[in-house]
Amino acid sequence: MLQTILVPVSIVTGTGLIAGLLLSIASKFFAVKVDETVANLREVLPGANCGACGCAGCDEYASKMPAGEAPPNLCPVGGAPVAAKLGEILGVSVGDIEPKRAVVKCRGHLQTSEYIMDYDGPKTCKAAKLYYNGRTSCNFACLGYGDCTNVCEYDAIHIVDHIAKVDEDKCIGCSACARVCPNSILELLPRSQKTYVACMNKDKGVDTRKVCSNGCIGCKKCERVCEFGAITVENNCAHIDPEKCTNCGKCAEGCPVHCIHLENLQ
């Protein structure tokens, strides 16, 4: 009786010991060596996994830095303090980091652009873009269904009067909103950059005026008055180079349709 119990128990125990031994050997043989530098970098990163650095998440960003595939100053969530720690681990100089925030390059609300239809489909910008180009007559305008609001983890962007508005005090410049906007009207700019063109319409001026009273008409008046070569008109729409712009305001003051936004001047 005792023998009938001990034999199977011994077999199971022996099998378990052998299996454990084999697993232990296999774990040593197939072990993937952990790069301590990558682990240290990952520990410093905030873990937001926002993708603003251009990587799929913090893990990928941490793995790219030691190989020189990504600089240590790309994390907008961590900002300068995190960049300094990353640079210290890597043994490199980080330099100055300009914090950024998102801006909405559209002012085509329902008071300035003609309302042309009601939409009863899925209330997302992506879906609306697939079915049609928006409820107003401008094909480049904010669609106003809040895809940007839904992806923002910091409550920094909301839809007001059918157009996106950014709360600059809350925005960290992660670019999540810009990546989901089907009309690409959200752009990241340095916080020191106070001037930008609030329009993305690339139609000819006469056609733009037909659909929005605030749209850029490509007249190049801004380009002519800028003394620093910071603003150019391409594809019938003005664009400002933040590296050249001094925020002097001359372009905004001279714009006949008031599509150039200058903080404190509007």
Image: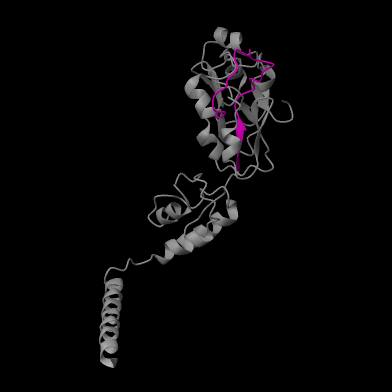
**Most foreground residue, 155 or 215:** 155
Residue 257 is situated, as x and y percent measured from the top left of the image, at: 66, 15
> Which quadrant is the C terminus positioned in?
top right
Q: Is residue 222 left or right of residue 33?
A: right
> Farthest residue toward the front?
1
Where are the magenta residues, as a range? 100-124
**Most foreground residue, 215 or 247:** 215
Q: Is residue 109 magenta?
A: yes
Displayed quadrant of residue 237? top right
Relative height, residue 208 to residue 263 (above, below): above
Residue drawn at x 44%, y 47% is 56
Q: Is residue 121 magenta?
A: yes
**Most foreground residue, 204 or 193:** 204
Q: Is residue 50 left or right of residue 17?
A: right
Relative height, residue 18 to residue 212 (above, below): below
Residue 192 is situated, as x and y percent measured from the top left of the image, at: 64, 38
Q: Is residue 182 visible?
A: no
Q: Is residue 163 visible?
A: yes
Residue 1 is situated, as x and y percent measured from the top left of the image, at: 28, 91
Displayed quadrant of residue 239? top right
Relative height, residue 148 to residue 78 (above, below): above
Would you say the magenta stretch is mainly helix, strand or loop? Answer: loop
Relative height, residue 24 to residue 204 (above, below): below
Q: Is residue 60 left or right of residue 217?
A: left
Residue 148 is situated, as x and y percent measured from the top left of the image, at: 58, 35
> Farthest residue toward the bottom?
2
Q: How is the image coloured?
A: one colour
